[in-house]
Image (cartoon, rainbow, N blue to C red):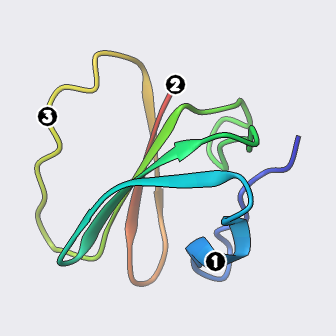
């Protein structure tokens, strides 16, 4: 399994072969992990990835454990 590398930012196009876009609006996107890639925080496979460029965002109750990763421009929330 390949781990998402966020050490130099996150570009969804680098992982488009295994991530499916579920929802996108101004400054946020939700993706489903179909590869499966592993989380850069805990190194375990994740189910969904929420990415936001906004200073604040609400994404509801994930109902499952989650991990966070921060790049210079984005916050990434991985649900397991």
**Location of residue 44 in the rendering, given as x and y in whole percent from the top left corner:** 71, 30
State if disc 3 and disc 2 touch (CB < 8 Å): no
State if disc 1 and disc 2 touch (CB < 8 Å): no
Residue 60, which numbered label? Answer: 3
Distance, label 2 to label 3, CA atoms, is 15 Å
Q: Nearer the viewer, mark 2 or mark 1?
A: 1
Q: Quadrant of residue 13?
A: bottom right
Report the side of 44 relative to 60 (left or right).
Answer: right
For marks 1 and 3 on the same chain, the one whose residue lies earlier in the sequence:
1
Name the residue carrying label 1: 13
How many C-alpha atoms fall within 10 Å of the one at disc 2: few (<14), some, or many (≥20)? some
For marks 2 and 1 on the same chain, the one whose residue lies earlier in the sequence:
1
Looking at the picture, does residue 79 appear above or below residue 1?
above
Distance, label 2 to label 1, CA atoms, is 22 Å
**Closer to us: 64 or 30:** 30
Q: Quadrant of residue 60?
A: top left
Report the side of 71 relative to 34 (left or right).
Answer: left
What SS does tag 3 mark?
A: loop
**Location of residue 75 in the rendering, given as x and y in whole percent from the top left corner:** 37, 64
**Closer to us: 4 or 16:** 16
Residue ID at (71%, 52%): 18
Question: In the picture, which quadrant includes the N terminus?
Answer: top right
Q: Nearer the viewer, mark 1 or mark 3?
A: 1
Q: Quadrant of residue 61?
A: top left
What SS does tag 1 mark?
A: helix
Distance, label 1 to label 3, CA atoms, is 26 Å
What SS does tag 2 mark?
A: loop
For marks 2 and 3 on the same chain, the one whose residue lies earlier in the sequence:
3
Report the side of 54 relative to 62 (left or right).
Answer: left
Residue 50, which numbered label? Answer: none
Name the residue carrying label 2: 80
């Amino acid at each position: 399994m390949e781990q998402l590398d966020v050490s130099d930012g996150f570009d969804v196009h680098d992982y488009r072969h295994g991530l499916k876009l579920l929802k996108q609006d101004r400054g946020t996107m939700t993706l489903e992990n179909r590869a499966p890639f592993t989380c850069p925080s805990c190194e375990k496979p994740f189910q969904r990835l929420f990415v936001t460029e906004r200073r604040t965002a609400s994404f509801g109750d994930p109902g499952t454990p989650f991990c966070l990763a921060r790049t210079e421009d984005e916050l990434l929330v991985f649900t397991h």
